[in-house]
Structure formats: C-alpha cells, structure tokens
C-alpha cells in the first residue's frame, strides 16, 4: 500500500477487509486495523553525511535519543550502524536529524559524534539532554578496541585502549553543529572495578535547580548483580560530573524523571527477566535508593529499553508518560504502547498502542506542545536491496487526548 501525497503526519488511516491466503486456507482480519501516519526519519541503506569526506551508506539505525529544545527544535540522535546490526564494538557513529516544523519534515542523518574509522573505533547508545542555558548535550559510549560485544570484552580500569569511555559532545546552536572536541570524564567518575558504564540510552533531564542528570548503567563481570542502573549528574553546567550508586537489583537501561517533591524516580530495564520493570526513587542524588510501590509488579517488561517523561500540560495537568513494547515475555518486542499516570506512577493506564508490529523495541517520548506528544522509535523496514529487515527510525505526532482516551 502506498500513501497519497496528501497524507500528513498525525493523520490516522484505517485498513479493512484484509485477506491472506496460505496454501489452501484463507485468513481474514475481521476488525479494521488503524495506523497513524508518521515520518520515517532514517531508513536502512540511507546515506549519512560525515564530519569529513563523502557520505556513507548505513545498513541499520538503532537506539533513539530525542528531545524538543526550549526553542521548539526537534532533535533525534541514534546509532548509525554502517555494516551490521550488532552493538559496539563495531563501526558505529552517532547520527542526528532535526525538524523545525513539528516533525512534519526532517533533515537527513548527519554525524554528530565520530570516534574514528573502523570496528576498533565506535560510539553509540546516545543519551541527550538540554541544560538550563539551552546547551544540548549528547553522551555516548565510545570504544577504541574490538574483539566482540563491549559488554563482554570491555575491561576494568580507565585505559581507553581496553575499556569503554563516557564521552560527551555539545551544541549551542540547536543541533546544527556539534563540538568536535569530546568531553571525557571517565577517569573521575568511573569506578575502576567496573568493566563498562554508559548512559540511558534515551534522554536525560535538567532538575529545577539546574542540575543536569543522565540515567546511567554500570556493568561488572563476575558479580551479582552484574549490571546496575544509576545516575550521572553535574551541578556546575557540565564542568564536573559525579556518579550515584547502583540500585539494588540487576538492571541496565533506564530513564529518570523529577517528582513533585524534588526526588528522582528511575525506571529500569530488568535484567532478571521476570517480566516487570524495576522502579526506584532517590532523595539524595543516587546515594540511596528506595523501591517504588510499583517496583517489579506493574509495568510490563520484555527485557528492553523504555522511555519515561514528566509533563505539565495546561489542559491535561501533570502526567507521567511511559512507552515500551507492552509485553512481559522476554525479547517479545511488539505492541509499542504509550501509558499515562496521573499520580506519579502509582497507577498506569491500559495504554494506547501506537504500533502493533514487531520492532527492535526502543523508543523516546517528548512533549511537543500542550496537546501533542512526539515519539521516535525503532521499526523494521524492509529493503528492496536485500531480503532481510533493516532497522530504521519512525516518528509519530500523537494528540494527548488520544492517549488519555485509552484508559
């Protein structure tokens, strides 16, 4: 099916009378299927503009990080995985796209962070935040070695030749250009006993007092728990950085929000694979964590990244919004769903399904205006060049009223 040129982002289409024949048996979809029209902001085999030299074709795009700046620009960063779908260590850059018309059109992918050429130099799993001065930060895990997946081959200590680095770049012009000199506080914030630590991925937050907070995760081979979620933060506009302590559970990719009383809630991927999200709260910047009442018992968790944001809408009030593949089965990454909470995460709605298809599962929410939510998420895009799927990035504009109706 091909959409009309008159189709617009945010419009809903309904497909009915679907039929499929397999062998001698005919299958029918009795109920109409509704899908919202979105933008494909990056697709497999697309060229990525480089910091130097000609553009490069990229096989896969994964791991979204997205924000709307205080001036209204939409920014989405993600891994440009040039040769294969797999994680670092590999030939990966952090690419960025921009929209200045509310997500109706986007620039083509361009490199924002480049760790060097080849499999021995890569950066990925971006996490993005805007600070109180309007400066945009991107954190990404950087590797300068190869030999397998970074989670398995990264070593203890601080040596960039054998352990992953916490690198950051920044932009002071709404993401049009990015600092080529990367900030690397690894030696001051990484516990040398850890094998690896990195942010989110997804987005960070700026607290009411101006503190910049990245969700983070630390990995230690041979320990239990092997991975723990935490926070990395700066109280002096990015000059110095500190790490919190890990939550008392096997967790990894996380997102954070500031609650009304000033405490921080962290919502985590559960590496115990029990089918529910891990949720903790801290009042002392991650020195201590207290299990939230929904910890390990409420939000479905297919062992995947998720997105969490706090909004204050003049029309709809204060809400938490959460997105992930709404499935408790490990690695069952389908049914991308957005839920809301009116009581700071104590209870959640049933959820609005924005895409029922199988995806890689990662997503990032952002409030676009008082009545509109934006979501960037991974989707499988079939390529005509090859028979397998190429991971791409989708964007949807969704009215908040649509999400609130799905109680």
Image (tube, grey):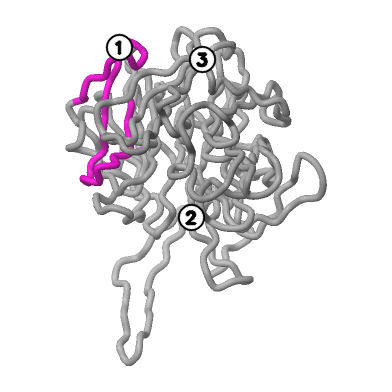
Give whichever of 172, 180 is nearer the camera.
180
Going 21% across and 31% down the picture, which residue do you hit? 295
Going 71% across and 54% down the picture, which residue do you hit? 47
Q: Position of residue 92 (x, y in %)?
A: 61, 46
Q: Residues within 10 Å of mark 3 (few under 14, many from 20)?
A: some
Q: In this image, 326 relative to 179: left or right?
A: left
Going 50% across and 50% down the picture, which residue do you hit? 148
Q: Position of residue 170 (x, y in %)?
A: 65, 24
Q: Residues within 10 Å of mark 2 (few under 14, many from 20)?
A: many
Q: In this image, 344 relative to 182: left or right?
A: left
Which mark lies nearer to you, 3 or 1?
3
Going 56% across and 20% down the picture, which residue do you hit? 185
Separation (CA) of disc 3 from disc 2: 34 Å
Residue 35: quadrant of the picture: bottom left
Region in magenta: 266-292
Q: Earlier in the sequence, mark 3 or mark 1?
A: 3
Residue 250: quadrant of the picture: top left
Q: Is residue 287 magenta?
A: yes
Q: Residues within 10 Å of mark 1 (few under 14, many from 20)?
A: some
Provide the secondary structure element on which disc 1 rests: loop
> Which residue is labeled 3 in the image?
241
Instruction: Pick out the residue farthest to the right.
Output: 53
Q: Position of residue 187 (x, y in %)?
A: 54, 20
When the figure is inspected, residue 18 is found, relative to residue 11, above or below; the finding is below
> Which residue is labeled 1 in the image?
283
> Which residue is labeled 2 in the image?
379
Q: Earlier in the sequence, mark 2 or mark 1?
A: 1
Give whichever of 90, 52 is nearer the camera.
90
Provide the secondary structure element on which disc 3 rests: loop
């Amino acid at each position: 099916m091909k959409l009309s040129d008159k189709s617009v982002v945010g419009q809903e289409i309904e497909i009915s009378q679907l039929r499929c024949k397999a062998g001698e048996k005919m299958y029918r979809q009795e109920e109409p299927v509704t899908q919202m029209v979105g933008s494909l902001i990056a697709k497999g085999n697309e060229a990525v503009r480089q910091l130097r030299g000609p553009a490069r074709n990229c096989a896969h795009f994964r791991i979204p990080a997205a924000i709307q700046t205080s001036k209204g620009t939409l920014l989405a960063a993600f891994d440009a995985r040039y040769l294969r779908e797999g994680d670092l260590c590999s030939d990966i850059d952090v690419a960025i796209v921009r929209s200045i018309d509310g997500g109706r059109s986007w620039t083509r992918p361009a490199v924002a962070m480049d760790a060097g050429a080849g499999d021995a130099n890569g950066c990925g799993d971006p996490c993005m935040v805007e600070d109180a001065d309007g400066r945009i930060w991107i954190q990404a895990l950087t590797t300068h070695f190869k030999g397998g997946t970074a989670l398995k081959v990264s070593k203890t200590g601080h040596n960039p030749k054998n352990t992953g680095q916490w690198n950051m770049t920044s932009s002071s012009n709404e993401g049009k250009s990015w600092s080529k000199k990367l900030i690397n506080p690894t030696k001051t914030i990484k516990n040398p006993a850890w094998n690896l630590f990195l942010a989110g991925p997804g987005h960070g937050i700026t607290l009411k007092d101006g503190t910049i907070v990245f969700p983070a995760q630390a990995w230690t081979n041979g320990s239990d728990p092997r991975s723990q979620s935490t926070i990395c933060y700066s109280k002096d506009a990015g000059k110095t950085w500190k790490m919190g302590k890990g939550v008392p559970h096997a967790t990894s990719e996380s997102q954070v929000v500031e609650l009304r009383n000033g405490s921080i809630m962290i919502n985590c991927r559960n590496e115990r694979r029990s089918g529910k999200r891990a949720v903790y709260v801290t009042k002392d910047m991650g020195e201590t964590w207290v299990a939230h009442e929904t910890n390990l018992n409420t939000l479905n968790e297919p062992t995947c990244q998720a997105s969490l944001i706090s909004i204050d809408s003049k029309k709809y009030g204060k809400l938490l919004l959460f997105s992930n593949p709404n499935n408790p089965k490990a690695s069952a990454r389908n049914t991308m769903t957005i839920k809301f909470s009116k009581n700071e995460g104590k209870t959640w709605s049933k959820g609005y399904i924005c895409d029922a298809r199988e995806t890689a599962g990662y997503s990032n929410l952002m409030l676009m205006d008082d009545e509109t939510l934006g979501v960037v998420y991974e989707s499988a895009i079939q390529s005509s060049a090859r028979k397998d799927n190429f991971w791409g990035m989708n964007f949807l504009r969704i009215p908040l009223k649509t999400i609130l109706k799905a109680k």
